[in-house]
Structures are given as C-alpha cells and as structure tokens.
C-alpha cells in the first residue's frame, strides 16, 4: 500500500518476532521477520526495507557482524538500523553507534517507547532522502547531470550505479574536487570512467551544512586576518548583527603573485567582487600591459558571513590554477631556428582556451568535454597521448620537445574539437577567437603554425 513502511526484523527469540509483528501492523507497516541473520541477508536486496530492527546477541551470526555486511552494500548502506539487546554495557552501546546503528533499545523495552523510536528513525530517514535526488541515466549520458550539479553549486556527491560498477564525483560549490569508483581501474582516469557510463541509475546527495564547521572556519579566518572582537560597552544598545544592520560583509582580500615565464616576469592578480553575482577575476600582465583576463562567476552573490570561507576558497583555487599553468610554461623559449616545438607552449595555449570556455559553460562541463575530445582523437593523433589533464582542467605536457609536424596539428585538432563540442551546448562559445585568448604567446604560436593549423581545420584564429 502507498505509504506502507517495510520493516525487516531479525531476532532468534520467537516471542520478540511475534510481538513486533503485532505492533508493526498494516496499513502503516509491513513486517518480514527472520530467526537467522543469514536468511535475512539472502532476501534483503529483494525486500528493499525501509527499516531494519535486529538483535545483537544471536548464535550463528551476531548483530554487529550483520550490520557490517549491510553497510558494505551500496543499496542497503543508507537503510536505518535499530539494535535490540539485553546487553546494557556502555561500551557495547558505543560500538553499536560507531558501527552505523541509528538507535539502540534495551530489552525488555516499553512498547510505546519502541513505536515512538521506530517512527522517529523513519522520519529522520525521510528527511535525509529529501536531500538526495535519484533517477535513471538517459541516452544523453552523464554530462547533463554534471551540468546540473555545477549550476546548482552542489556541495556533495553524484554517484552513478551501473551493472558491475559504481562511479562517483564529489563537488564543492559546484566544482569537481575528486572522482573515483569501483571496480578500481589503475590505467583509467576516474572521470573518464564516469563519463563512459551510458545507462544505470544516479543519486545526487547534498552534503548537510555543519554549523560548527562554519563557526570554526570563521574563527580561523578572523585569527589569520588578525581581527579581534570588540567588547560591547556596558551601557547603550547592543549593535545588530551585520546582516540585520544592512552592512555588507567584506569579501576576502585577493592575491598578487609574480612568475618568471621564459625569462620575463608575469604578474598574476586575482580578486573577487559581487557585481551583482560573485565573480572571481584573474588578470595577467607583463611590463604593465594586460595580457589576459580570466573570470568565473556564480549565479548569486556571496554576502553572508557564512560565505567568507567559501569565497576565499574560490579565490585561492583560481589563482593557484593559473600559477600552476604559468609555471609549467617556465624556462627558456625554443630558438626560432629550431625545427621543434615546446609541447608546454601548446598545453598552455589550450589551457587558456579552456579557461575562456569555462566562463560560459562551467568548470565541470568544460573539463568533461576536454576529456571526451582528448580520448576521441588519440587514435587519429597519437601525439595527444603525450598530454594529460589535471583535475582542474589544466592541460599538461608529459612529452619532450618534438617536431612541430606531429604536435601542432594534434593540439590544433583537439582545440577545434573542444570548442565545437562546447558550442553545441552554449552557442556563444562559437564566437571565441583564438588570437585574443592566447595573446600572451601569440608570436610563438604563429611561428610554430598553430593558428594556420586551426584555420585549416575550419577554426578562425583572428
């Protein structure tokens, strides 16, 4: 019946099983009782219970072992679990909770109290499920799910379940921070494995906000900034909190760095502002001339005190990503007379194209498309195997300088394919011009024939 909760009871005492069957009656409950935990394990997946009530001390398999087996199952690990036991020692109760039990009820128990606890645990489980979205992976695959997570600034996990495998990606404020899954495939990138899934089910979980974690983060920020709390005067009204008084909470300060790139200093400055959306801007300049401006924006402002640490993390992440790209390009430029091309130059150029697309498409989608096009072109352009992708989307060269006849057409084809794939999702990307985006290294890219290779593939470099 709709609304009926399915409860699995495991207890070796027959009178306990009969008592629970009488208490948990239809239409609110449907009880499946087992004497042996091993019999219950054989049927748990088919039953898909809403709640498990289990004894601790049983002859063949105790309740603690049964709980461990349940928690190892991806399908059952979130099912609420209540222990029944005549054991009252504190250590036993603590171990039960640490093992993942949601409640521990001592025998003999009061019937009304047991019913209240069952309903309370089920209500809590419903609230947890409200923080998760589930559904089927459709023909369009995983990309729309990643875009959803980014657009909604997910802080949590997207998990995809397919036959024989489980793949996941964790996000912070909509940006991917790590990926993984089972079975482990050492030679396969975890995000590539996720994108390769074409059917199955998905689960999107929003991590619950922790008030204490926010308070701790704000305390660290105030300590680092050297801010001291001002005592409230003994007389006079207590000032209203900043938000109530209409005061705008200041965003964290930006960062300024200097990096040597091919013998010349490049200044990197990153700042954030609400205008009106929260926007992080990084400017690259050399000898007073602005070479590139990189922006990433959220769909809303960050104005609350609780947002300060999140804003700081976004500033740090973008600044460090640009610095890492510049440092990889460091060193001396190859001689103009040389017949080879520095792969770091091409990696850097494509990384800047990715940054521009990221502004329109979002970080997760941009990285996903970059990986997809990289994988699709490797057979036709084996030189691309000498490049890899960092989790933040930076293109990194692992190969040595080589003849431009192999590297340049390969990276040009990758660049053109990436922009075309992004333009299918956001039309504005089609207007992207390569020369302005890569102005910092325009002369060198011209020398090695990068722009002409892109033009030959149908992409204007002007």
Image (cartoon, rainbow, N blue to C red):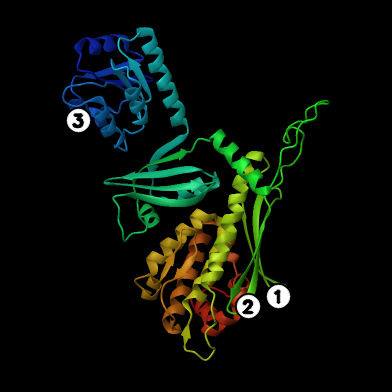
Q: Name the residue that disc number 2 marks.
A: 264
Q: Nearer the viewer, residue 338 or 192?
A: 338
Q: Position of residue 440 (x, y in %)?
A: 62, 74
Q: Identify the residue at the far bottom of this view.
A: 337
Left or right: where does residue 434 sit relative to residue 202? Answer: right
Q: Quick check: marks 1 and 3 in contact, CB under 8 Å?
A: no
Q: Residue 265: which quarter of the image?
A: bottom right
On screen, residue 138 above or below 286: above
- Helix, strand or loop at mark 3: helix
| Real-space CA distance between mark 1 and mark 3, rounded to the nearest whole angstrom | 72 Å
Image point (28%, 9%), residue name: 22
Residue occupied by mark 3: 42
- Compared with 286, 279 (above or below) is above
Give the residue at mark 1: 287
Residue at 47% x, 49% y is 146
Counting residues from the start of the chain, the first of labels 1 and 2 encountered is 2
Mark before the other along the chain sequence, 2 or 3 = 3
Element type at mark 1: loop
Residue 288, percent across and down? 72, 73
In the displayed structure image, the side of residue 101 where residue 209 appears, left or right: right
Q: What is the CA distance from the residue labelled 2 to the residue labelled 3?
A: 68 Å
Q: Position of residue 245 (x, y in %)?
A: 77, 34
Q: Is residue 462 visible?
A: no
């Amino acid at each position: 019946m709709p609304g009926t909760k399915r409860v699995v009871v495991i207890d070796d005492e027959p009178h306990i099983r009969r008592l629970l069957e009488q208490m948990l009656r239809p239409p609110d409950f449907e009880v499946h009782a087992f004497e042996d935990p091993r019999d219950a394990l054989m049927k748990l997946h088919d039953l898909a219970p809403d709640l498990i009530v289990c004894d601790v001390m049983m002859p063949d398999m105790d309740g603690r072992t049964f709980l461990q087996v349940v928690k190892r199952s991806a399908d059952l690990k979130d099912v609420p679990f209540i222990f029944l036991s005549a054991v009252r020692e504190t250590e036993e109760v603590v171990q039960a909770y640490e093992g993942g039990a949601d409640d521990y009820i001592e025998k003999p128990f009061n019937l009304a109290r047991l019913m209240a606890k069952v309903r309370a645990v089920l209500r809590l489980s419903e609230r947890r499920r409200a923080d998760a979205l589930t559904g089927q992976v459709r023909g369009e695959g995983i990309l729309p799910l990643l875009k959803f997570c980014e657009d909604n600034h997910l802080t949590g996990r997207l998990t995809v379940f397919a036959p024989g495998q489980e793949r996941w990606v964790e996000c912070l404020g909509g940006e991917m921070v790590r990926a993984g899954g089972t079975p482990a495939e050492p030679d396969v990138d975890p995000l590539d494995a996720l994108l390769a899934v074409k059917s199955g089910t998905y689960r999107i979980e929003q991590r619950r906000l922790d008030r204490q974690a926010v308070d701790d983060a704000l305390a660290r920020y105030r300590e680092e900034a050297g801010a001291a709390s001002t005592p409230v005067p003994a007389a006079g009204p207590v000032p209203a909190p900043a938000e109530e008084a209409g005061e705008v909470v200041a965003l964290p300060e930006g960062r300024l760095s200097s990096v040597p790139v091919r013998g010349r200093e490049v200044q990197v400055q990153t700042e954030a502002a609400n205008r009106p959306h929260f926007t992080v801007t990084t400017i690259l300049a050399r000898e007073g001339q602005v070479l590139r401006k990189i922006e990433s924006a959220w769909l809303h402002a960050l104005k609350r005190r609780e947002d300060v640490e999140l804003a700081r993390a976004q500033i740090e992440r973008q600044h460090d990503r640009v610095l890492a790209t510049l440092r990889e390009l460091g060193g001396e430029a190859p001689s103009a007379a040389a017949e080879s091309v520095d792969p770091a130059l091409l990696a850097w150029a494509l990384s800047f194209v990715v940054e521009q697309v990221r502004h329109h498409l979002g970080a997760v989608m941009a990285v996903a498309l970059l990986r997809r096009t990289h994988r699709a072109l490797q057979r036709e352009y084996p030189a691309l195997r000498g490049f890899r992708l960092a989790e933040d989307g930076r293109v990194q060269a692992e190969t040595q300088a080589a003849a431009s006849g192999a590297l340049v057409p390969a990276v040009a084809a990758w660049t053109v394919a990436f922009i075309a794939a992004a333009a299918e999702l956001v039309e504005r990307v089609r207007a992207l011009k390569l020369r302005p985006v890569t102005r910092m290294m325009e002369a060198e890219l011209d020398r090695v024939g990068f722009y002409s290779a892109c033009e030959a593939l149908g992409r204007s470099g002007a």
